[in-house]
Amino acid sequence: MDLLRQYSEEDDEPRSAHNGGLTEEPPSTSGRMLDDDREASPEILSLPSKSSAPVVSSAIIVKHQTESADPGLRVVDPSKKLVSYNPTVDQLYAPVVGPAHPYAKDGLANGARNHKQGVVEDAFIAPFNFDEQYNTYQTFGYAADPSAANGALVGDETAMKSYDGATVYNIPAREQKRRKLEAAAQKEGEEQDEEAGNVASENWLKAKSPWAGKKEYVQPELTEEQKKYAEEHAAKQKGKEKGDKPVTEDKSVFHGKEERDYQGRSWIEPPKDIKAQNEHCYIPKRWVHTWSGHTKGVAAIRFFPKSGHLLLSASMDTKIKIWDVHGSGKCMQTYMGHSKAVRDVTFNNTGTRFLSASYDRNIKLWDTETGAVLKTFSTGKVPYVVKFHPDEDKQNVILAGMSDKKIVQWDTETGEITQEYDEHLGAVNTITFVDDNKRFVTSSDDKSLRVWDWNIPVVIKYISEPTMHSMPAISMHPDGKYFAAQSLDNQILIYGARDRFRLNRKKVFKGHLNAGYACQVNFSPDGRFVMSGDAEGRLFFWDWKTCKIFRTFKAHDQVTIGCEWHPLETSKVATCSWDGTIKYWD
């Protein structure tokens, strides 16, 4: 019994491990058999649990938490690959905090900021006081300091002293005194003069009227210079009322050395050594000469008939000049008589006379040699084109296309109108004689061509299509079978010059830019080339047979308005432009 009791006491005490503090499970009290089995089986040992995380002192976490004022601030730096402490889940998955917005309302980045420029404090100021200080600052340059309690002022100190710190709503003492004196004087005057309130009285005029207090103005006597100016002005106004036009004196200036040579020949006679060099024409290649004497753009140029030794030019500076082409290359004579820009000029068959049409509504017949004006023609409208009749026996007959849609025919010997052709619906731009000078073709702003029999004011052919444009320039082919029309849709059209006047649709010359400009079109003397300027200052040459561009080059800085082929020297061309120059090409 003693042995059993001792065994049971040993079983009740826990068995302490002999190896490393290992402990055994307590024995079961189920009986002797279990105890015997336990003694027979090996002992089961339980190992201590191990952690994979490194041993970290908690002092680091405490230190970091004390340094971080904001607990929501991220603890773990994402750029580092090694963490020296055990972060919590909240610290690992905290959102990444970016840069603070400079104008954030929460004021984390910029302190307690409620405005992008700082802190604005609520303050109250009466609207009247604000307007008073604002207007005072705008007027005088100073105002009361709203942040100062002692009524200090800010701004211009000099103005502050001169106005005694008064605002725009405060009247200074001296101003108050002046107003009181004025009021007292006015009251005293009203008491003295009872009729001052009567508008019809003279006292009211002196006291209350807008002219009160002003001295009566006495007109002094005019000086001699002022009297002369007044008389001239009155005469000018009287002339305007009557409709008189300013008269421009007709005169000319000869610039050459001698008007006649040692043999008594005139300066306009062609030299005897001028002859046709070659019937075959060539395209010019170089610029050889420039005539510059006009102060404004040149509108038209014409070579002297047959010889071409002189060149006539009409300009927008109201002057007409004739230039020496064969000899010195200088200006020979200047013709002055128009008061406005000259639109067109043309020689007669011999070159002894020429016509000029100007925007002053006058057509003048000039003597080429002496520069005298032989006749002046006018209908009161602007002439756009003038022509001599080409026949030798009709050199005393001229035609003019006017701005009032008429073609007017004059006799230069009598100065009277002999015929009028009135069928067009717009201003007449060109007159071209065709069919051995028995007929003539006219073009107009009404986008039509009309053919007339000479001296019969009835249209025999009317050419107009919906696709047609205005044709401000027309030129005859040397063989007389065709004429070329410069159309304002950037192409040159060819019409037959015989009975039917049909459009030759196979011959169309394109490539230049002339929309809006009356660029002159011309032919070479042998008819092989078609020539025209364009709006960009270029000069174009087309082959008559192929209708292709043969050559083009830059001729002027502005629009090349006119071009003429020399009648004898078959490779020379003259061009004029609105830049005021005339150029000669060879």
Image (cartoon, rainbow, N blue to C red):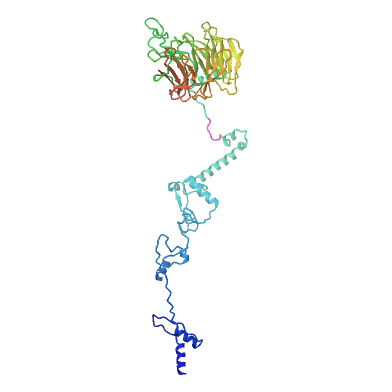
On the question of residue 172 being in view, the answer is no
Residue 311 pos. (x, y %):
44, 14
136 and 252: which is toward the camera: 252
Judge whether residue 132 can be spotted in this image. Answer: yes
Extreme residue in the top direction:
263
Q: Quadrant of the C terminus?
A: top left
Q: Residue at x 55, y 7 (%)?
A: 414
Per the picture, the main secondary structure of the magenta-coloured stretch is: loop
Residue 49 % position (x, y): 43, 74
Find out whether residue 215 is within the magenta segment.
yes
Q: Does residue 135 lie above or below 293 as drawn?
A: below
Query: Residue 291 is drawn in which quadrant?
Result: top left
Residue in the picture at 44% in, 80% down: 44
Q: Is residue 298 left or right of residue 243?
A: left
Residue furthest bottom as drawn? 1
What segment is highlighted magenta in the picture?
211-216
Residue placed most toward the observer, 120 or 17: 17
